[in-house]
Image (tube, helix red, strand yellow):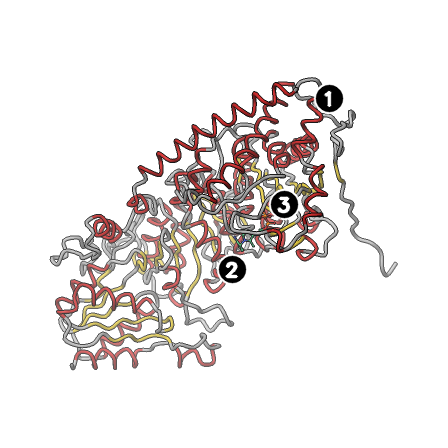
Amino acid sequence: MPRSPVAEFTIDRVQVLDQEGRVDESLEPDIDDERLLEWYRTMKHARRLDRRVIALQRRGELGTYAPSTGQEAAQVGSTAALSDDDWTVPAFREHPSALARGLSAQGIFEYAMGLEEGGEPPDEVPIMPPSIAVGTQPLHAAGIGWAEAMNGSDTVALTYFGDGATSEGEVYEAMNLAGVYEAQTIFFCQNNQYAISTPLSKQTRAATLAQKAVAAGIEPIQVDGNDILGVYLVTQEAIERARRGVPTLIEATTYRREMHTTADDPSVYRTVEEEEEWEPLDPILRFEGYLRERGILDDETVTEIESDIEEVLETDLEAARETAANADPADMFETAYGDPPEYLERQRDAFLDDSGREVAPADGSRRGDGGSAAAESGVTEDAERLNMVEAIRKTLGAELERDDDVLVYGQDVGVDGGVFRATQGLLDTFPGRVHDAPVAEAGIVGLGVGLSVAGYRPVAEIQFAGFSFQAFSQIHQHVSRLRSRSRGKLTCPMVIRAPYGLGVKALEHHSESYEAGYAHVPGLKVVIPATAGDAAGLLRSAIRNPDPVLFLEPMPLYRAARRPVPEEHTVPLGEARVVAEGTDVTVVTWGAMVREVEGAVDASEVSADVIDLRSISPMDAETVLESVRKTGRCVVVHEAPRTGGFGAEIAARISDEAVWHLEAPIERVAGYDVPVPLFGREEAYRPDEARIRAAIERVASQ
Ligand SMILES: Cc1ncc(C[n+]2csc(CCOP(=O)(O)OP(=O)(O)O)c2C)c(N)n1
């Protein structure tokens, strides 16, 4: 039998109410009249909300809005199947679902007014704020569903996304990861036939979207998405399966009857005839037919419901207008961080006093105590001596021990102990809390958002920092912004560890140093230890920090000399370390370059302050500035390409606040502006002692 089928699949489609609103009694769910009327009311509410928002948008009062007209059954039917504790993880068109969860339209109006207030989830409803980046939020539902599975709870997470989103890799990653981790997650795809102007036929060659579940090994089902009873039924079944650790992809076929958003004109890409074909299939019409047939709806009730909705919408709109009238622009500073950098406070002060200039006090009074010559503050010689990788491993173990919410996961971190052995042995000591992950960086980071929301403190490993780019969307769009998006209600205190930098002669993409790019992501903190003690101290602080932290581990230092690392050692984020004190020049650096700089300074006759920045974001500008005010000279050394590197930011800060103290131009010793070469030319690219020494001597001699 040289060739035989190894897998076969079928996709079922469910319809309970046919196109005329006739019910298939064998499938009809048992729902009481009051509840059915409530669903109807919510659908009408959402429909009317669309009309109201579109009118207000046309008048210029509201901004861009994505209507849900035509998709009410898909959303209300699925949300109705959830319990109060279950999560919904929406995209941006899920107004009927939000109303079905008991949210008022006030938030929807506010969001359309461009106010974060509208995305702030109410305390009592487990719902994520809107997610605008297509296809990115299913990973969060996978993370929540995984967390709930680990908690042994019955809670599930249901995420909404569109047909277009199924073309995004992150949606596949989400389904695949949910399958692997037996996450209690339901993936609800509203196939409304279009992604803006792109019809389904141009989105995929697949005959159904439901079958995309098959590749991920989760359950597929298709339902007539304009049939609220069918949607309710399949969602109920999916919830039951999810509670047993079997995720489902539901494809609800429907039609977006309005424009994509208020900025869109559908007449450009579809015909009126096509729109008219869908008219009789409208979900509200069909449900109304069923309710009338059942004898629980008549013209009078419809009128009553409609006028009640008008009243409620008016009240909600007024409340939203009031929010807008009282919205404080300075609010944007309040929720970017749980533990904000002090310079953000100065930016806020400058914003508030309209001076437009944020200046630190010249006496350096805001300086942290990191700027002391006690090279590794708190490190005593009698502490256990560890190299960096041992220090990281030990700290991870200690934090797993200390806090049950800490969870370690990533590629090969379990049995293998990580490719650098940073997690070796942890799986044995903490079974169930150390997890191998599939090769899916966006997935690994995106899961962390869901895990965080569900109460965990995820410590994820990206195998090499050069592959963090695969996760950049999640880091930039969600990890760093969840706190501000939800106005502090939901946070993502995750740590993303990644081996980083040049020096181990690895393959392409294994040696990048993109700290400047990550420092450019507000809401995210970026740290780079240069010693074993700092690795332990910074990692411990990072895990306990309320904000997400990217923790970059210089590979050539992993197995450098063992240094004393005290138990329970912590190093505050945002404080530089003064490695050596001198008088003539300030050298600022971090990571593996610290060692090179020390060598260069030792080899030269120049008396230098050597500052290991340790935290790239927030950076300890005061320690740098104070030193430059003393020496009048500065050299910045980093591996990353010179242009746009973090050295430019340091030079700018010196220009802002200490330029009159300078006696020579600032020099940057950096990688060249070329892609990091393969290791055959790595030595030529990487700043070495000779280049650094020459720069220090040049600057010192001016
Ligand atoms: C990652 C990303 N790419 C592009 C966009 C711009 N965009 C907004 S909505 C949309 C189409 C989404 O289609 P679909 O997933 O079918 O959802 P629908 O809008 O139909 O609800 C696009 C391309 C975006 N928001 N995010």
**Which residue was labeled with disc 3?**
179
Earlier along the polypeptide chain: callout 3 or callout 1?
Answer: 3
Pointer 3: residues within 10 angstroms few (<14), some, or many (20+)? many
Label 1: which secondary element? helix
Earlier along the polypeptide chain: callout 2 or callout 1?
Answer: 1
Whole-percent x and y of residue 460? 47, 51
Whole-percent x and y of residue 127? 49, 36
Question: What is the count of numbered marks?
Answer: 3
Question: In percent of the image, x 17 and y 56: which residue is there?
Answer: 360
Q: CA distance from mark 3 to mark 1?
A: 41 Å
**Which residue was labeled with disc 2?**
470
Amino acid type of the residue tagged 3 in the rendering: Gly
**Residue 293 disc label:** 1
Looking at this view, name the residue that lies furthest to the right: 1
Label 3: which secondary element? helix
For the residues carrying marks 3 and 2, which lies nearer the camera in this image?
Answer: 2
**Nearer the observer, 668 or 407:** 668
Left or right: 262, with 222 as reference point: left
Q: CA distance from mark 3 to mark 2?
A: 21 Å
